Image (spheres, rainbow, N blue to C red):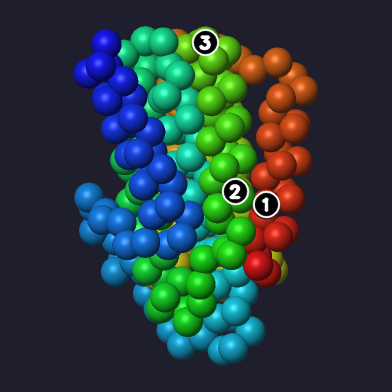
């Protein structure tokens, strides 16, 4: 009994440490090398630099939310295989987080000042999904990754509001992230994801749109 209590405290402290590190921009370690070297970079003028920085700040905040979401879901997953699936996906999202943070530094910018708020909200949503059951838990992963994939595709394809063509480094990072998100969704479907009820995807899009609008500037 006492050892179980210590174990629970250790897990809680580990979660808190990860939340603080993720939210406040501490240097995490990526398992994979950044894909930015694959992009052809040409000098950016000030407007393009600021726009790229705003979009990469959104992407960084999205990865903060992904970390919180997956860890919240994993904390309440009922099946060990589901928990391992979520933790593995969170590990790859750590790579994305590091890549985006490094690119923000190169663009002479910073992460969102509201990341602790985004983290707390996403963890709570993930916990609720986890409590709903593993099928719904994985369904939430599928819908999240589909929406993130569409968002990243917008950054690559929209010539007016997406990443500048000259910013090859940021575009290479976003392309690699997009490929990972599509794979996460497919893996969750194969693991037994259930389709979410109709109102939930719409509410998720609304919340994501608010986050993007705010994180672009703050």
User: 10 Å neighbourhood of mark 2: few (<14), some, or many (≥20)?
Assistant: many
Q: Which mark is residue 211?
A: 1
Residue 133 left/right relative to 33: right
Image height of 50 relative to 139, above or below: below
Q: At 72% from the left edge and 48% from the top edge, which residue is drawn?
A: 209
Please tell me which residue lies in front, 68 or 8.
Answer: 8
Image height of 117 relative to 40, above or below: above
Q: At 72% from the left edge and 58% from the top edge, which residue is drawn?
A: 213
Image height of 136 relative to 184, above or below: above
User: 10 Å neighbourhood of mark 3: few (<14), some, or many (≥20)?
Assistant: some
Under circle 3, the secondary element is loop
Pointer 1 with pointer 3, Cβ within 8 A = no
Q: Position of residue 190 (x, y in %)?
A: 40, 16
Under circle 2, the secondary element is helix
Please tell me which residue lies in front, 170 or 63.
Answer: 63
Q: Position of residue 145 (x, y in %)?
A: 52, 35
Please tell me which residue lies in front, 135 or 21.
Answer: 21
Mark 2 highlights which residue?
A: 118
Please tell me which residue lies in front, 99 or 214.
Answer: 214
Q: Position of residue 210 (x, y in %)?
A: 74, 50
Q: Earlier in the sequence, mark 1 or mark 3?
A: 3
How many labels, in total? Answer: 3
Q: Position of residue 9 (x, y in %)?
A: 33, 30
Pointer 3 with pointer 2, Cβ within 8 A = no
Under circle 1, the secondary element is helix
Pointer 1 with pointer 2, Cβ within 8 A = yes
In the image as oriented, which residue stretches furthest toward the front?
A: 2
Quote the CA–CA distance across marks 1 and 2: 8 Å
Mark 3 highlights which residue?
A: 133
The C terminus appears in which quarter of the rendering?
Answer: bottom right
């Amino acid at each position: 009994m006492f050892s179980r209590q210590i174990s629970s405290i250790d897990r809680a402290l580990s979660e808190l440490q990860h939340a603080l590190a993720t939210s406040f921009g501490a240097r995490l370690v990526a398992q994979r090398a950044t894909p930015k070297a694959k992009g052809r970079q040409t000098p950016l003028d000030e407007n393009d630099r600021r726009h790229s920085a705003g979009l990469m700040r959104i992407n960084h905040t999205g990865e903060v939310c992904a970390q919180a979401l997956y860890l919240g879901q994993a904390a309440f997953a009922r099946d060990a295989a589901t928990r391992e699936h979520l933790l593995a996906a969170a590990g790859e999202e750590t790579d994305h987080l590091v890549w985006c943070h490094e690119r923000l530094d190169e663009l002479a910018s910073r992460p969102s000042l509201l990341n602790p708020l985004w983290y707390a909200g996403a963890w709570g949503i993930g916990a609720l999904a986890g409590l709903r059951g593993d099928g719904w838990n994985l369904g939430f992963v599928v819908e999240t990754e589909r929406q993130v994939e569409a968002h990243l595709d917008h950054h690559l394809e929209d010539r007016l509001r997406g990443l500048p063509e000259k910013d090859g480094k940021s575009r290479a990072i976003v392309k690699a992230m997009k490929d990972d998100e599509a794979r996460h969704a497919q893996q969750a479907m194969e693991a037994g994801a259930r389709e979410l009820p109709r109102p939930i995807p719409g509410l998720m899009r609304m919340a994501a749109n608010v986050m993007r609008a705010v994180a672009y500037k703050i």
